[in-house]
Image (cartoon, coloured by chain):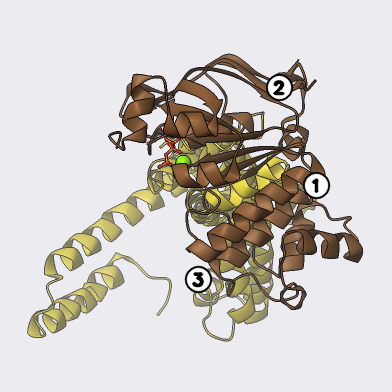
Chain colours: A brown, B yellow
Amino acid sequence: MSRPILESINLTRTVSIDNKPRTIVDNFSFQFQQGGSYLIIGPSGAGKSSLLRLFNRLDEPTTGTIRFHDKDQCNYSPCKLRRSIGYLFQTPYLFEGSIIDNIRYADSELSDDDITRLTDMVHLRSNLIHSGSSRLSGGELQRVAMARLLAMSPEVILLDEPTSSLDPTHTETIEELIGEIRRKHSVTVIVVSHDPAQALRIGGDALLMVEGRLIETGPVEQIVNNPQTEFGQLYRDRKLS
Amino acid sequence: MNNPALTEVVISLLLVVASLAITRYWKINVAKDISLGSVRAFVQLIAVGYVLQLVFDIESVWLVLLCLAVMILIGAQAAASRIKGFRGSFAITLLAMTVGSFFTLASMLALNIITMEARYIIPLGGMIIGNSMNATALTLDRLTSDVKNNRLAIETSLALGKSWRVASVGFVRSAATTGMISILNFMKTVGIVALPGAMTGMILAGADPLEAVYLQIIVAYMLLAAVVVTSIVTVELTIRKFFTRFHQLTLND
Ligand SMILES: Nc1ncnc2c1ncn2[C@@H]1O[C@H](COP(=O)(O)OP(=O)(O)OP(=O)(O)O)[C@@H](O)[C@H]1O
Ligand SMILES: [Mg+2]
């Protein structure tokens, strides 16, 4: 019924650290289905952010390919591809200027109505939008970055630990927002999370990643509570650093 | 004072001795620097004097070009050595200084402001090259450190589908401005705060003040053009080193 939108095939990225090669994404193969919800979990340093950077083509794979809509990513212009596969960084960055300026940066032709629609979507108080970005709280900053991302109307969104800098109440509202976006806009959502409880709350298919490799996949409840692999059990028992 | 001879130079050494005495009395530890500096200034300038004499006597276009080339090479090397952690900086400073200097000198020749004579080309070329050296070093330094310190901002732009050009344009502009700032400040204050060297020299040598001023104005405009061209060439060459053709930021650190 669904078809793959994003596919990685034997994806590998090797970087050199102090002149020694190190594989940070290792032979990673997976198909993401259109409209799906995916959680990439794994210990710190597993290569989760590195994988998202490859999907957004901010880095080049050493070997392997990424396919988007059944076509090699090399067939797309990098700039267009990035607008279709939106990427929210682990530490979101806002440019100088107002919140509107920041959202318009993603698309200068947005009308005032579009802006209102976007800020409503992320539940950003409308009296904020003309103010500068420097005095926002962590949660508000995350929402602006989210609105700016949605302004590109991406088909896939990559969210890298979207709540890592937030307190529990903000965390909850961002999680709700992620669910809403997915339901209302049939976007494929790929969320990186280091928190199994959060992964369960968001729901979907989980991908456990350790040392650059894809270890185990399946419904998030299974991966978090009842993993089949040794690494999966170690991760569940918090024995992976 | 008539045109100075060696006697006056030797007598002026008394000022060096006075400086030594004063700093020693206040226990400012610069005796070695003063001695070395004074000797170096003497030797280097005398040497240059003889070289210039020779070049002016021979009056060959090729010799003039050779002098310019040597000055640019040394200047480009000095500018590149100021930048740390950036491979290929010499090629950039060399090309930027060459383009900036030759563009300016060629324009002056084409506009008939100067003629192809060693006594114009060499001193003006020297001033141009010195200023263009500072411009390329400042610009290159500013751009490399800005790009390295603003990785998140640049990649945020790229991730929003902007080209490398758009993602870096703010840093490119401010780096180019950095290279131009000293000549712009010079032009704003010249004549009010200080009398520049070229003009002072001409007046000391007995020229009309007005004639000296005309020359100084030409020199200022000439340096402006040299610095602007050098800074632009520098940023255009440098910024490309930071991006792949797939609009990816690469920091090889
Ligand atoms: N360009 C690079 N050069 C060298 N090492 C890198 C580079 N990019 C990432 N790494 C290393 O690769 C490993 C994986 O990093 P990555 O940021 O992808 O992990 P992560 O799973 O996102 O971790 P976290 O949960 O802490 O964010 C880390 O050890 C990191 O230091
Ligand atoms: Mg990460």
User: Distance from label 2 to label 3 (Cα)?
Assistant: 60 Å
Mark 3 burial class by Cα count in 10 Å: few <14, some 14-19, many 20+: few
Helix, strand or loop status at disc 1:
helix
Can residue B63 be seen from the camera position used here?
A: no
Name the chain under label 3.
B
Identify the image quadrant of residue A142: bottom right
Q: Nearer the viewer, residue B234 or A83?
A: A83
Q: Where does label 1 land, which residue?
A: A184
Mark 2 vs mark 1, foreground winner is 1
Task: Give the number of the disc on residue B197.
Answer: 3
Q: Nearer the viewer, residue A170 or B104?
A: A170
Q: Earlier in the sequence, mark 2 or mark 1?
A: 2
Count of numbered badges drawn on the protein? 3
Q: Nearer the viewer, residue B1 or A123?
A: A123
Q: Position of residue B5 (x, y in %)?
A: 34, 67
The answer to whether B29 is drawn above or below residue A176 in the figure is: below
The residue type indicated by label 1 comes to Lys
Q: Position of residue A48 (x, y in %)?
A: 48, 34
Mark 1 vs mark 3, foreground winner is 1
The residue type indicated by label 3 comes to Gly
The answer to whether A38 is drawn above or below residue A4 in the figure is: below
Identify the image quadrant of residue A218: top right
